[in-house]
Image (cartoon, grey):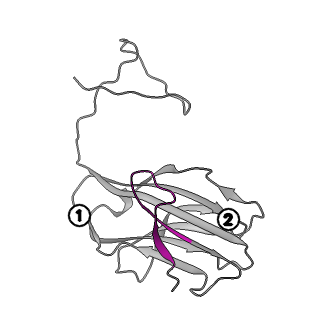
Amino acid sequence: AYYPWQLTEDGCVSPTHSVYVWDNRNHDPYGGNNNLTLKQPLDLSKDGSYYLTFWHNYRLDQSFVLWVEVSTDGGANWNWAGRYGSYDHWDNYSTGDFVQEVLNLDDYAGQPEVLLRFRFDWTAGWYYYGVWFLDDIIVSYIPPHAPVPDIKANGSDGPVTISTSDTLYITTE
């Protein structure tokens, strides 16, 4: 039997499994949308900040779009929090390896029941092949007025500039 989302040992960030979905134009028993919805709603009712962090790896031909979506009404309506790929682009997309994504969920703070889903979508029409691996899906909460550490660069108290190519090491005292 074919199930759209499956566990695999073929690729993961932390041992020993990740979840993945794949399809191609010759194998389409589930239609153009395959959803992975978290089973239990999240309680984001506390005041503070919320973040969805996950690792993913994908290889997509044209017309595939990967959505990360949020619902506050039991799944009747979905809002997108993240999008990868394109309906109207003829290029292929690939992360090459697992990359980490961090999505801010502050728009949903105060909501007692929030659903999250990952949607593998190729409803735009013609497609070849796509696969999406997900691992280490975490929702984090940061309380309001959480202490922010002082950051010093090489012992100075001046501003710190960090580029995307820098590695930042933080130690606490």
SS class of the residue under badge 2?
loop
Separation (CA) of disc 1 from disc 2:
33 Å
Can residue 56 be found in the magenta stretch? no
The range drawn in magenta is 4-21
Type of amino acid at the residue the image marks with label 2: Ser
Residue bearing mark 2: 86
Residue at the spot x=65%, y=80% of the render? Answer: 123
SS class of the residue under badge 1?
loop
Can residue 6 be found in the magenta stretch? yes
In this picture, residue 148 sits left or right of residue 134:
left
Outermost residue to the right: 90
How far across and how far down the image is residue 91, in percent?
Answer: 76, 60
Residue at the spot x=22%, y=48% of the render? Answer: 143
How far across and how far down the image is residue 144, in percent?
Answer: 23, 47
Residue bearing mark 1: 45
Residue at the spot x=39%, y=53% of the render? Answer: 15
Question: Quick check: 1 above or below 158?
Answer: below
The label number, if any, that marks residue 96 in the structure image: none
106 vs 36, nearest the viewer: 36
83 vs 2, nearest the viewer: 2
Q: Quadrant of residue 66?
A: bottom right
Residue at the spot x=47%, y=72% of the render? Answer: 6
Type of amino acid at the residue the image marks with label 1: Ser
In this picture, residue 162 sits left or right of residue 42:
right
